[in-house]
């Protein structure tokens, strides 16, 4: 039943965003984002995708923030030389207790593009340990931003 609840939440949020989306075509900067609720990140990135906004990732992008790699088109996102992605299995915090979230981890795995899934697999998979993708390894997968950017919006 819990899985059905997640699917329903994602569907409702996506439908609401899709119905109200406008073609904005501005620029959003994601800087030093530690992640958070997976559903909120899915909704945020789908909204950015539908609105056609250019997204610049600058600095750390960890946990649910990394969904940007699968939810935004390649030509809509770019990375600075300071970008560092941090991947791990999903979990839920219940006060002082942190429990694994297999459904959240499955969402990560389904959303990530092939090259990211392959890289994660070659670095031990999605576990409680954070693995980092940055520098030359990231640049080998995706070209960096080609032009300078100004902060028009920040998420």
Image: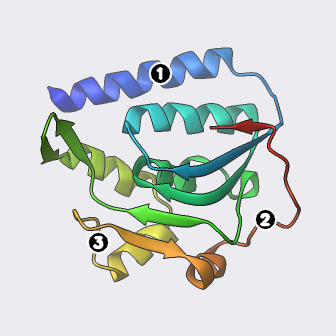
Question: Quarter-wise, where is residue 84 in the image?
Answer: bottom right
Q: Which is more toward the observer, 57 or 43?
A: 57
Q: Determine whether, in the image, residue 6 is placed left or right of residue 65.
A: left
User: In the picture shown, does residue 16 fall above or below 96?
Assistant: above
Residue 13 is marked as 1
Residue 145 is marked as 2
Q: Residue at x 60, y 60 (%)?
A: 59
Quarter of the image with the N terminus is top left
Secondary structure state at the residue bearing disc 1: helix
Q: Residue at x 38, y 73 (%)?
A: 120
Secondary structure state at the residue bearing disc 2: loop
Q: Residue at x 22, y 62 (%)?
A: 128
Secondary structure state at the residue bearing disc 3: loop
Where residue 82 appears, as percent x and y from the top left, is: 65, 68
Quarter of the image with the C terminus is top right
User: In the picture shown, does residue 149 fall above or below 98?
Assistant: below
Where residue 99 appears, as percent x and y from the top left, is: 13, 46
Task: State the CA–CA distance, disc 2 to disc 3.
Answer: 28 Å
The residue sitting at the front extreme is: 96
Q: Quick one: label 1, few (<14), some, or many (20+) residues within 10 Å?
A: some
Q: Which residue is mark 3?
A: 125
User: In the picture shown, does residue 116 fall above or below 16?
Assistant: below
Q: Check contact, mark 3 vs mark 1: CB within 8 A.
A: no
Q: Determine whether, in the image, residue 4 is placed left or right of residue 139.
A: left
Task: State the CA–CA distance, disc 3 to disc 1.
Answer: 29 Å
Q: Determine whether, in the image, residue 102 is placed left or right of residue 79.
A: left
């Amino acid at each position: 039943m819990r899985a059905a609840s997640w699917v329903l939440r994602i569907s409702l949020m996506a439908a609401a965003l899709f119905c109200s989306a406008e073609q904005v075509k501005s620029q959003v900067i994601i800087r030093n984002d530690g992640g958070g609720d997976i559903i909120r990140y899915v909704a945020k990135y789908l909204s950015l995708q539908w609105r056609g906004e250019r997204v610049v990732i600058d600095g750390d992008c960890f946990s649910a923030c990394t969904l940007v790699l699968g939810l935004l088109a390649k030509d809509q996102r770019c990375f600075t030389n300071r970008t560092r992605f941090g991947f791990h299995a999903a979990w839920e915090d219940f006060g002082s207790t942190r429990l694994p979230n297999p459904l959240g981890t499955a969402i990560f795995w389904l959303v990530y593009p092939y090259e990211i899934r392959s890289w994660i697999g070659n670095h031990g998979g999605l576990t409680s340990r954070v693995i980092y993708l940055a520098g030359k390894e990231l640049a080998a997968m995706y070209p960096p931003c080609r032009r300078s950017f100004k902060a028009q919006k920040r998420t």
